[in-house]
Amino acid sequence: MLKVASGAVCAVLFAGTAIADDTVTWKDNIQGWSVAIDRTIDDSCFIISGFEDDLFLRFQFNATQQNVQFIVASIHWDSLKSGQDYDLEVAFGGQEAWAGTAKGYRWNDILPSLVLSVPMEDQQASHFMHEFTAMGTVSVVHDGSEIANLALAGAAEAVASMLDCQAAMTQANKARATGNDPFAPKPDPI
């Protein structure tokens, strides 16, 4: 699936930050996908895989923005500008395309990427995730030209693991917030 030379680029997209400790692997190699936790966005979980033609796909929860994000990247998109808006259409299988505005982004200031955010409201994120897992392929179009056409083999299993990861992170964050530390000193009742 990935060429050896692309391994370093995939590591950049995997980490998503300059500090490797900000990303923790949850499960590796679920039919070509990795599941990980991004500490920089409130322990949000994501999946990532590399494809032919040096294309990469990352799909994630973003707990800080309360949405899911579809991120497609290529080392060949040198003219892509970070922070710029790009019209994007994402079509799973033969379904009607999701149209929206993606933000240009450079992971670690290196890898050109497009980030399409899908809000949780009105079950949009749920429908998007269902199509991602059920349709088997995805076509990404910008400005009338297809920039990616990817087979999503193993996506259903990877997303199921991502959902398990997110449930565990939500539970852990709730426990931290309520102070369920059995080793913490007890408050003085006086």
Image: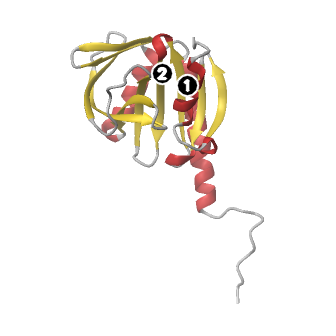
Give me the residue at 26% from left, 30% from top.
86
Foreground: 96 or 24? 24
Give me the residue at 22% from left, 19% from top.
143
Q: Secondary structure at mark 1?
A: helix
Q: Which mark is residue 68?
A: none
Q: Is residue 36 left or right of residue 189?
A: left
Foreground: 89 or 189? 89
Give the labeled residue for mark 1.
Answer: 10
Quadrant of the image containing the C terminus = bottom right
Residue 182 vertical position relative to residue 166 in the rendered view, above or below:
below
Give the labeled residue for mark 2.
Answer: 56
Query: CA gap, disc 2 to disc 1?
Result: 7 Å
Going by the numbered disc 1, the residue's amino acid type is Cys
Quadrant of the image containing the N terminus = top right
Q: Residues within 10 Å of mark 1 (few under 14, many from 20)?
A: many
Q: Are marks 2 and 1 in contact (CB under 8 Å)?
A: yes
Labels 2 and 1: the sequence-earlier one: 1
**Residue 136 appears anywhere in the view:** no
Foreground: 75 or 46? 75
Report x, y in % for residue 103: 32, 35
Q: Secondary structure at mark 2?
A: strand
